[in-house]
Image (tube, grey):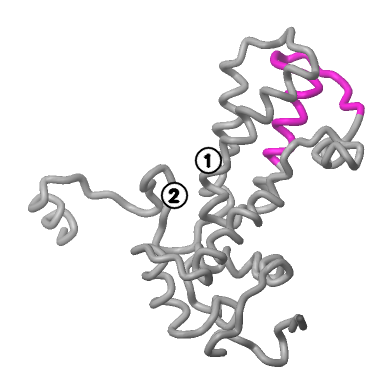
């Protein structure tokens, strides 16, 4: 009742979690795999509107890269997507590549894990959504530690870092977004490098030191 009174005072509807904000699902608790699978549903739904059953394998590969693979990018840029959702991405793209559209079943000659390898490794160069998910989240880590000055980045620094570096921070009791950034911390640590300066963000015994 109190919530409805506030909604009436502001002349708006009374909503409930989980809800969507700027196209992303948000909640006051951890989002489940089903609640984060909207991108997979959109990818499957997009195929139903395609009338391209006569495209060659080359045409299908272009359409996969330019359309289907781009659908989950926005979500993967904010959340660590569950493995089950990545498998749906692979299944949808693999089914379209081998079978096209329609209900006619065709044999999948090669598993999708072989197709999404780079061409120099004898794959077809399809984007691996797991690697892309990690790369997009690592980009957040880079922005946080590189001194980028924006309202969002400054808010994250003050809330979670408190004068420390990202690798010194903890994900315990934090939001699902911050836990996702820590899920790729190992990959981020492998490729990062920075100048020591004051040393507040340096872990003397754990960081890898480079000589001149």
What residue range appears in magenta? 88-109
Instruction: Residue at 22% x, 49% y: name it.
Output: 14
- Residue 190 lies, with reference to residue 63, above or below; the image says below
Residue placed farthest to the top in the image? 54
**Rendered-image quadrant of the C terminus:** bottom right
In the rendered image, residue 78 lying in the magenta stretch gets the answer no
Residue placed farthest to the bottom in the image? 205
For residue 196, which quarter of the picture?
bottom right
| Secondary structure beneath label 1 | helix
Instruction: Residue at 70% x, 31% y: name it.
Output: 92
**Residue nearer the viewer, 195 or 58:** 195
Q: Is the Cβ of the residue at disc 2 closer than 8 Å to that at disc 1?
A: yes
Q: Position of residue 209 (x, y in %)?
A: 74, 83
Residue placed farthest to the front in the image? 212
Disc 2 from disc 1: Cα separation: 9 Å
Residue underneath mark 1: 38
> Dot 2: few (<14), some (14–19), or many (≥20) neighbours within 10 Å?
some
Instruction: Residue at 8% x, 53% y: name it.
Output: 9
Instruction: Residue at 78% x, 13% y: name it.
Output: 56
Residue underneath mark 2: 25
Q: Is residue 57 left or right of residue 186?
A: right
Q: Position of residue 51 (x, y in %)?
A: 62, 10
Q: Position of residue 158 (x, y in %)?
A: 39, 77
- Residue 132 lies, with reference to residue 197, above or below; the image says above
For residue 28, which quarter of the picture?
bottom left
- Residue 171 lies, with reference to residue 82, above or below; the image says below
**Residue nearer the viewer, 21 or 106:** 21
| Secondary structure beneath label 2 | strand
């Amino acid at each position: 009742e109190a919530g409805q009174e506030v909604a009436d005072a502001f002349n708006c509807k009374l909503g409930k979690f989980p809800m969507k904000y700027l196209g992303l699902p948000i909640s006051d608790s951890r989002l489940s795999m089903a609640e984060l699978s909207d991108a997979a549903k959109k990818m499957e739904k997009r195929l139903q509107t395609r009338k391209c059953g006569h495209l060659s394998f080359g045409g299908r590969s272009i359409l996969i890269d330019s359309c289907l693979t781009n659908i989950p990018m926005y979500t993967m840029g904010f959340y660590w997507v569950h493995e089950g959702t990545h498998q749906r991405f692979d299944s949808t793209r693999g089914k379209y590549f081998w079978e096209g559209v329609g209900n006619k079943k065709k044999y999948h000659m090669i598993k999708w894990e072989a197709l999404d390898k780079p061409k120099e490794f004898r794959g077809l160069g399809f984007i691996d959504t797991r690697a892309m998910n990690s790369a997009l989240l690592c980009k957040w880590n880079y922005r946080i530690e590189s001194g980028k000055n924006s309202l969002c980045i400054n808010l994250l620094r003050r809330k979670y870092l408190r004068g420390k570096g990202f690798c010194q921070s903890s994900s315990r009791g934090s939001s699902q977004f911050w836990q996702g950034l820590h899920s790729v911390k190992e990959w981020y640590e492998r490729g990062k490098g920075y100048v020591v300066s004051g040393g507040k963000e340096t872990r003397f015994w754990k960081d890898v030191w480079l000589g001149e």
